Image (tube, rainbow, N blue to C red):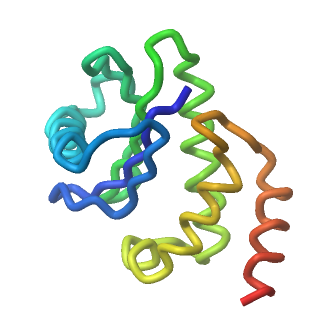
């Protein structure tokens, strides 16, 4: 089960946070800072999986952004890596060469994408064409 999803830049600014477990605000801020301090110092020689408290962080770096999923220790690492990759591919197609500013100014669309892909901390949909079709429907309603 996914505990939370974070998208952070190299400076540590959180561009998106989706929480699937109840944390109070102080704990959320502490988690955000700890995850960034762990993930940002790792080089390409390290794996993209890090044990963190009683959980596991699965992350991927694309350009200047870190896409991090916190999940249970026993969950499948590669499934979450694939989910992150699908998420970024769909973002890239939706925004036509996505950048950090797209995430900032269109955060409601990004949250809609997260909600289409993940439901209650589990991977709901993995098919990019289906997700893109749903996003097109949502966009047409605006």
Residue 51 location, x and y as percent?
Answer: 31, 17
| In the image: residue 91, left or right of residue 99 | right
Specify the quadrant of the image occupied by residue 78: top right
Q: Is residue 40 visible?
A: no
Which part of the image, by quadrant, shows the C terminus? bottom right
Query: Image point 49% across, 40% down: which residue?
Result: 20
Q: Is residue 85 visible?
A: yes
Please say if 105 is above or below 62.
Answer: below
The front one of 59 and 69 is 69
**Picture residue at 38% right of the left edge, 49% below the top:** 6
On screen, residue 137 versus residue 24, left or right, reads right
Q: Residue furthest top?
A: 74
Quadrant housing the N terminus: top right
Between 51 and 112, the one lying in front of the other is 112
Residue drawn 66% across the image and 60% down it: 90
x%, y% of residue 36? 20, 43
Could you say which quadrant of the image residue 93 lies in?
bottom right
The quadrant holding residue 31 is: top left
From the top left corner, tell me how far across and down residue 104 is, in percent: 39, 76
Q: Position of residue 95 (x, y in %)?
A: 59, 76
Q: Nearer the viewer, residue 70 or 120?
A: 120
């Amino acid at each position: 089960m996914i505990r939370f999803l974070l998208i952070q830049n190299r400076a540590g600014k959180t561009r998106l946070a989706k929480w699937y477990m109840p944390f109070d605000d102080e704990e959320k801020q502490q988690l955000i800072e700890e995850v960034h301090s762990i993930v940002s110092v790792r080089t390409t020689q390290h794996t993209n999986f890090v044990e963190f408290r009683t959980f596991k962080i699965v992350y991927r770096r694309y350009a200047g952004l870190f896409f991090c999923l916190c999940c249970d220790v026993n969950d499948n690492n590669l499934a979450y890596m694939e989910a992150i990759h699908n998420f970024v591919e769909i973002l890239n197609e939706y925004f036509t060469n996505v950048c950090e500013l797209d995430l900032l100014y269109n955060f409601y669309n990004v949250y809609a994408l997260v909600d289409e892909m993940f439901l209650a901390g589990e991977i709901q949909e993995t098919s990019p064409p289906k997700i893109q079709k749903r996003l097109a429907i949502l966009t047409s309603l605006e």
